[in-house]
Image (cartoon, grey):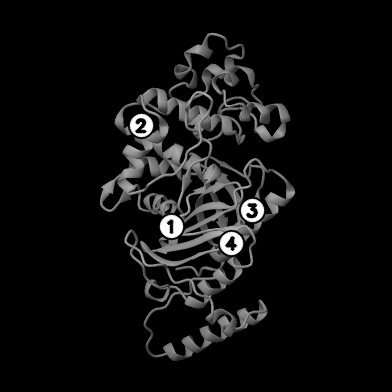
Amino acid sequence: MSGLQICPMRGQGSFLMIASAILIISMLVGCGLSTEDLEGVDYTPLPSDDWQVSTPAEQGSDPMFVAELYHNAAELETLYSLLVIKNGYLIAEDYFNEGSVDQKDRLQSVTKSYTSALVGIALEQGCLSSVDQKMLDFFPEVAGRITDPRKEQITIRNMLEMRAGYPNEETDPALWDGLLSGRYPPLIKAFPLVSDPGTRFNYSNLTSNWLGIIIDRACGMNLKAYAEEYLFSPLDVKAGEWGQDAEGHNNGCGDLHLTPRDAAKFGLLYLNDGVYQGNQVVPVNWVHDSLQTYSVNEAFVKKVGHFRDIGYGYHWWSANAGEHHVNFAWGHGGQLIVLVDEFDMVIVTTSYPFWKEHSDQSWNHEKAIITMVSEFVNSLPSE
């Protein structure tokens, strides 16, 4: 729970304040928590040169609701970090288990949202001419050997929307082995389509890797080098490792390592229409198009916690939580960058990444983190 708005009140204000306090206390009692439990929760941001810090109360949120969020976070065994940004200020921050402020965490599929941003930048710079360019235009070594003519129609737009028609690799061990092989262009031919391009959502890591290679080939720069010049540097971000395939291409689907604070800058960038500290880093129209919902309730899950109507844009997820809409970057294990535009809020989590671990256990831990965040968003009062 979080986010009761605090504002000056006159006349009936005393009555409303008392009623609000009674409501908060009753809700805490219902959850088995007392005000004493929450008063000891410390989520004060660490001293920072790269973030303006504030408090929930100063930014219009109730500190006790934020305290409950952090109380719940401390119960999770695999959570590394939890940050809350409101109105551009870092208002809450804490690290758990093996996490720390300087640790560059493996963000898993959150990386896909960065790949999407780089597609938008490449379009703005003219490396790419249109999202309707054909995928095979960038893979001449494969194009002449394609036997399924549907693959000739796949566009960059289809790839961004996860509607290229390629399968989810987790559905077949042979597909998963192909993903782990690190040799991706030949799989454009080898892997079958499971739907016509543009017709259905299928979550495909390979599709994101091919997008990364397209940027590399179109712009003539390694994906990480391109990101460092046109995305990371404007955000004053120092990226860590970014995994590569067998040919030296950075993986468009995952393996980018960043600190939680640096991940939060990316969320703030998208919350502010691609602008960071007065500079237009990602085109505003690209941010708008990326955060649209092109598929809904077609993914492997239709709800997690209070997140319902789970949808997909240009490598960004979307969902509804109660009366509120969110967009989010989502990575295996519980890596999240959640945008709550209605409240000018970004929520970031990093966690144990369960690298190459896909099991009920890993999903249960991931789901617990998403549920915690979704409950927090669901509890925010409508403005």
- Identified by mark 1, the residue type is Asp
Q: Label 4: which residue?
A: 97
Q: Position of residue 112 (x, y in %)?
A: 50, 39
Residue furthest left as drawn = 278
Q: Which mark is residue 115?
A: none
Mark nearer the viewer, 1 or 3 = 3
Q: Return the residue nearer the eye: 13 or 341.
A: 341
Q: Position of residue 104 (x, y in %)?
A: 47, 50
Q: Position of residue 47 (x, y in %)?
A: 37, 67
As measured in the structure, the alpha-carbon distance from the residue carrying label 1 to the one carrying label 3 is 23 Å
Q: Return the residue nearer the eye: 361 or 28.
A: 361
Q: Position of residue 265 (x, y in %)?
A: 39, 53
Q: Label 1: which residue?
A: 341
Q: Earlier in the sequence, mark 2 or mark 3?
A: 2
Q: Can residue 347 be seen in this snapshot?
A: yes
Which residue corresponds to the image point at 32% horizontal and 38% vertical from the top-left?
Answer: 230
Which residue corresponds to the image point at 41% horizontal and 32% vertical from the top-left?
Answer: 223
Secondary element at tag 4:
loop
Left or right: 328 in relation to 274: right
Q: Which mark is residue 122?
A: 2
Q: Earlier in the sequence, mark 4 or mark 3?
A: 4
As measured in the structure, the alpha-carbon distance from the residue carrying label 1 to the one carrying label 2 is 26 Å
> Dots 2 and 3: beta carbons under 8 Å?
no
Left or right: 141 in relation to 266: right
